[in-house]
Structure formats: C-alpha cells, structure tokens
Image: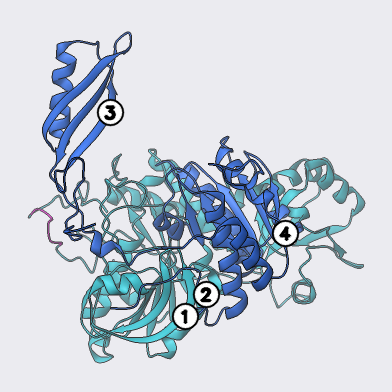
Amino acid sequence: MHDVDLAAVKPYADHLDDGLVQLSFTLPVPHSLAARRAALELAAKMGFDEPEVVHYEQLTEGYTYFVMYGRCTQTVDFAALQGEGFDIEYMSEDEIEHFAQTHLGRRVVVVGASTGSDTHSVGIDAMLNLKGYHGHHGLEGYRCFETYNLGSQVPNGVLLAKALEVEADAILVSQTVTQQNLHVHNLTELVEMVEAEGMRSRMILACGGPRVTGELAKELGYDAGFSKGTEPQHLATFIVRELAARAASGGSDGRAAAASPQSSPA
Amino acid sequence: MTQTLGELTASTRRLALVGLAKNTGKTETLAVLLRELASSPQGEAEGRRVGVTSVGRDGEERDVIDARIEKPRVRLAAGSLVATTDGLLRASAIAHDLLEQTGVRTPLGQVLVARLRDAGAIEVAGPSAAADVRAVADAMLAHGARQVLIDGAVDRRAASSPDVSDGLVLATGAVLDGDVHEVVSQTRDAVELLRLPLVEDATQPGRRLRALAAAADGSSLLVGVDGEPLPLPRHFILTAEPEQVAQLLDRSPDARWLLVAGALPEDFLISLLHPLKQHRRELTLIVADPTRVFLWGRGPAWFARQGVHLMTLRGIELLALTVNPVAPQSHRFDSVQLRRLLGEAIPGVPIFDVLHADYAGAHPRTGQPAGSDAAGASGPEY
C-alpha cells in the first residue's frame, strides 16, 4: 500500500481514490426503461456520483434486477478506528493444539446452540462440527476441545444447564440479530442467567451471527462477537488465549497475557 | 415535581441506570445526571468527582443495531473518573491521568480507570460482568469519586443487583409497545419484581430461611415448616419438565418454601401452576435478589394470584423511573399522559421525563427548536 490517506479512505476499483462502488439490488417494478431510470435515480439519492447501470434483467414477472456502478463521495477515517477491538493474530489448528497443551494442559469444554426461536444452526454447526467451514475443522475435530452442539431453538435455561453440567469453559450462542428487541433479549437473557447462577467469571461467553460486531457483543455483555467470515480456528484462538489469560491473571492483572495484542497507548 | 433526579439520587454511592429495553433513554438520563452534578454547588465544591462506567457502551454516535438512531454523547467534567477501554480513552483525545489498569478484557479492549484533566465527550465502555463492575466502581470510589454512575445496556439488569449497586433508576418508554397501556403494564410488572417482599428477619420462619440460604452450598432447597429441607437435583430449576415438578411436589406435601440458589426462569414458575392448583397448595419461592428472576409475560402479582409467591433475601432500592415517550423510528406518546398512567399503576416512586419542559432540572437543549411544544408530544428523540 502506498500513498493511502488513512484518515480519508475511499473505495478502490481501477485506481486509488476513484471511489468506484459496484452495487446490485432488485426493484419490484417491471423490466423496462422506466425501471432503469428508477435505478439511476435511486443510486443518485444514495449519494453516488455518476451512477451507471451496467446490467439489468427481469428477475421474475414484475421484478427487475440491477447491477450498477457509482462513485462514492464519502470517506472514512480508518486511522481513528485502528485502535479499536481485537486485531487477533489467529493461530493454525496445530498451533492451537500446542498452545492448549502448554498453557492449559487439559481439554477445553465448549457448549453451543442457537437460542430462543432462532432456527438457524449453520453458524454453530460451522464452528463446532467436525466438517467445519471453508476447509477448516470445527472445534469437534480438535484434540483439545470437547464440544456439545445443542442445535437450534434451545431455551436459555437448557443451554445454561448443559453448560453447568459439563462444566463448560465457554458458551457459544448464535442468533440472527434484527432490529426486533426479541432477538437481542434472547442474547442478554443468557448473560443475565449466567450472572444469576454466579458463573459469569468462570465462563467465556461468545456470540455469533451475521450482524454481530465487537461493539454489539460488548453492549450485550459477551466476551467476544463473531460474524460472517469467522472460521473455526478464529473462535478456537480466542477461546484458548482468553482461558490462558484468565488463568494467568486470576482476574487481577491480565495485561501481560492479554487475549488481544493492543496497540501501544498514544 | 420540584426535585431533580440529581438531588434525589445524590446520596447513593453506586447508582445503577437500567432500562427495560434498548432506547428507553438510559444514556439521556446519565447525561442529565452528569450535567446536574457538574452544575450543583456540591459538585463545584467537591471538584465534580463523579465516576462513570457502563456495562455496555455509552456515548457512541449511533445505535449499534439501528444506525438510523442517534445517541446522546456523554460529556464529562474535568476531574471526573471514568472506566473505559484504552482505545476509547485514546480516541476521546482528552488529557487524563491513568489510575488503574484493571486487567478486565472486553471485545473493545482492556478497561482502564482514568481521571480526566479536561472536560470532554467520551465513549464509555467499562466491564460487563457484575463482579468486575462492582470492583471498578469501588476502585473509582477509592480514588476519590463521591458517586459512581453505572450505566446499563440494552435490557440487562445485573448492574442493579445489590451485589453491584446501592440504588437504581429504571428507564422505561414507548419502545416497549405501541399500546400505551401495555407499556404501563410491562413497567408495572418490572417494578413489582424489583419490589419483591423481603424475607423478614423479625419472624422465626424468616430467620430459619435466611440461615438455610446462608448454609446452602449452591443447591436449591425445598423447605417445610418442620423437618429437614430437601435439596433439589442440580439444575432442576433450569430444566425440569412439568411432570418432574409435579412429582417433586407430590413427594413433599408439606413444602412451603423453595430457596432458589441461582436463576429462576418463568418456565419453572409455569410448571408449578397446575400441580399446586390440583392440591390447593401455595408455594413461596425465595431468590437471592430480584435480578435472579426471569419473567417473559407475567408479573409477580399474577403468579401470586395463582398461589406462586416470590420473595427475596436482598432488595433493590428503586429511586426513580425515567420515561422516554418516544420510540425511535416508530411512535410516540404524550409524555404527561404516559407519566400519569404510570403514576396511577405504580405508586410511591418519582417518575421523570428528563427532556420534558416540566422537568425540574429542565435545560434548553441545543438543536431543539425555540418554543417547542410544551406538552412534550414532539420532544426530541433520544
């Protein structure tokens, strides 16, 4: 990377700072020249300069699908964001096994589920099951993990009881967070129930879902949040490092063994 | 109403601000409290030594789930103490003295405790776990804070546990439901839960129950008037099926109380209803404090009418209710009417809309149009 102004970053397509963005969407209108005009007008309203329809076609009767280019006029201050959150250097499966053996010397117990009314279990399956995701084993395939995948639509009480029964080190919960309070409530209720059982300091709580960010995880009371693009070894790295940090600190000073390398203070 | 929220809560050392949902106005309440502390005579005299922490994240510009919602900033006076992450402290660019590295890790980084040398706006993200929140609050008190404000997150209640804080301001609002009466009824249920009757020290059964609770090693106990208490299987209360609950009650015909060791979910209360009714019995469940009870649709009074009573070993001091009559991106209620209905349903607690013109500490907000509606029906969104 050269000559990038990190305080004012723009999308890149053909050359630096051209701001070109490709976007695709469907409008519920018949395939027509009027539909094309509508797409152009919409992109202009989104704030794109020089919007251009490069492809459009009928998706089905009464619906038109568009692919467009446009120039983004906005920038973001990447420099101001760099200090935030985890910039974990992830370990490979072998490194994780070795780390767990050296620093923990025992198997790590992880219980996972999709809670409440959520019927999606693909996230949990990708993280925990042997098959894994993207060519990487799920935690079940590691020697150092003992995993329990409870599936989907699991009540918080049942998930918590299982975690207590098997003395889990970590609970992994997957939830499709929407703007409805219900989904958020499922996630906060689990945290509150773990607190009510007096087990919060003994268990790592991680949540995952398509819209989960570190900020959201913090707000909801979780130790980490994982979203799209997370591979099982990312989760595994976090869990073993965090456990080692907790073991080293005893809750007083975990800085030396922090789970996340922090950039040095300004 | 003549008293301000700041005056009402001044003597509470660790004050928790908890909401019944997102966007009920916790952070707005925090901002008003901070403003009142900074401008009060005591505040001036004592160097405005307030400590602030958040179990979530406060002072961010936009809502973490719905980016259309702008959030109030948190402005701290010079001399204030704050628990937040290293990254957020740095991003605030406020000159400060680092007092402690807590070793608490969050998804946003490590939590530090600092004293601000200058005033400024800052994002606050302290520890999330209740025990860590208490430790950080006590650290700020030890470093000279006169009061610590603990802001909650979403609908999390753990900060209001007597293990963490000494008093509570509860935020409710239009966001709970589109029907104003439903908002009132949900708020009333939540307050009933906060005000569960205490197990009395003055009576013999009360003293016995407290002694049993103190001696119990993590198991829940079914207690009768006489005889040995019966320890429940581990995790029974979290997972028991209705038939198992019925069998348990059949085996213990004299049981009057159930000392609950941990969390008490509504499912368990529901499973008690039928067997109790069948045998015309009643049962009193006793929790460590009200944050251990997880209700979804019914309040304690409803369960009491069915013969399932709730009591607590430790209480929570509810100091005030705050009301946000606006549901962002949705509907709004008339603030005066909402507060009147809440007051009728929930006697004995002051109710504030801190952004309304009739609030005792009312303060013109920048950005609010001059002469804005005094009835509050078009108040600013928060």
Marks 1 & 2, CB-CB < 8 Å contact: yes
Q: Disc 2 residue type? A: Asp
Residue B200, magenta (yes or no): no
Residue bearing the label numbered 2: B132
* Left or right of B100, for residue B38: left
Work out whether residue B30 can be spotted: yes
Q: Which residue lies furthest to the left in this view?
A: B370
Alpha carbon distance from label 2 to label 3: 46 Å
Residue bearing the label numbered 1: B102
* Left or right of B130, for residue B121: left
Tell me, what hue is chain A? blue
Residue drawn at the location 74% of the way across and 54% of the way down: B237
The percent coordinates of residue B192 (x first, y second) are 54, 57
What main secondary structure does the magenta stretch of the protein show?
Answer: loop
Marks 2 & 3, CB-CB < 8 Å contact: no
- Residue A199 marker: none
Q: Disc 1 residue type? A: Thr
Q: Disc 3 residue type? A: Ser
* Left or right of B161, for residue B366: left
- Decide which of A105, B57 is in the foreground and name it: A105
Same chain check for tags 2 and 4: no
Residue drawn at the location 48% of the way across and 45% of the way down: A209
Magenta-colored span: B365-369
- Indicate the secondary structure of the residue bearing disc 1: strand
For disc 4, the chain is: A
